[in-house]
Image (tube, rainbow, N blue to C red):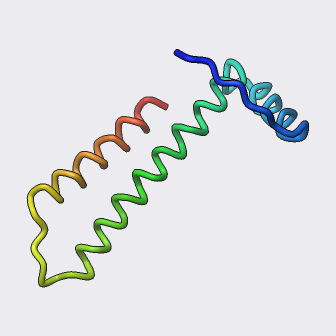
Amino acid sequence: MVSLNIAVPESAKKFIEGQVATGKFRDTAEYILALVEADRARRSGDEIETKLLHGLRSPSELMADEEWDDIRRVGEQLLEEKRRR
């Protein structure tokens, strides 16, 4: 694992420390990592939604096997990320 130093306003620091104090996170690094993972999962969900909407809006277009494979792959990633939490 690598280190990353960031500067945050005092109010953000206090908020992060408050989240750690709840006991749900071991330390600030674990809290920040949880935020990154949540954002990654959200973006993956956005990708799936975009592909599904594209498919729904184009009924005359058959989806290629590769497109279904992409949807399955992203869906499986989302499920795996939920299981790890």
Asked where in the image residue 9 lies, by quadrant, the reply is top right
Query: Does 1 sit above or below residue 47?
Result: above
- Front residue (pair 82, 43): 43
Question: Is 3 on the left or on the right of 47, as rendered?
Answer: right
Q: Residue at x 41, y 36 (%)?
A: 81
Query: Does 63 sit above or below residue 23?
Result: below
Residue at the top extreme, as displayed: 1
Q: Residue at x 12, y 84 (%)?
A: 60
- Could you tell me residue 39's position as x and y percent? 54, 46
Q: How many marks?
A: 0
Question: Is 28 on the left or on the right of 72, as rendered?
Answer: right
- Front residue (pair 68, 18): 68
Residue at the right extreme, as displayed: 10
- Could you tell me residue 22's position as x and y percent? 76, 28
Asked where in the image residue 58 lies, by quadrant, the reply is bottom left
Q: Residue at x 82, y 32 (%)?
A: 18
- Could you tell me residue 79's position as x and y percent? 35, 41
Q: Residue at x 24, y 55 (%)?
A: 71
- Could you tell me residue 57's position as x and y percent? 27, 82
Question: Is 45 on the left or on the right of 1, as rendered?
Answer: left
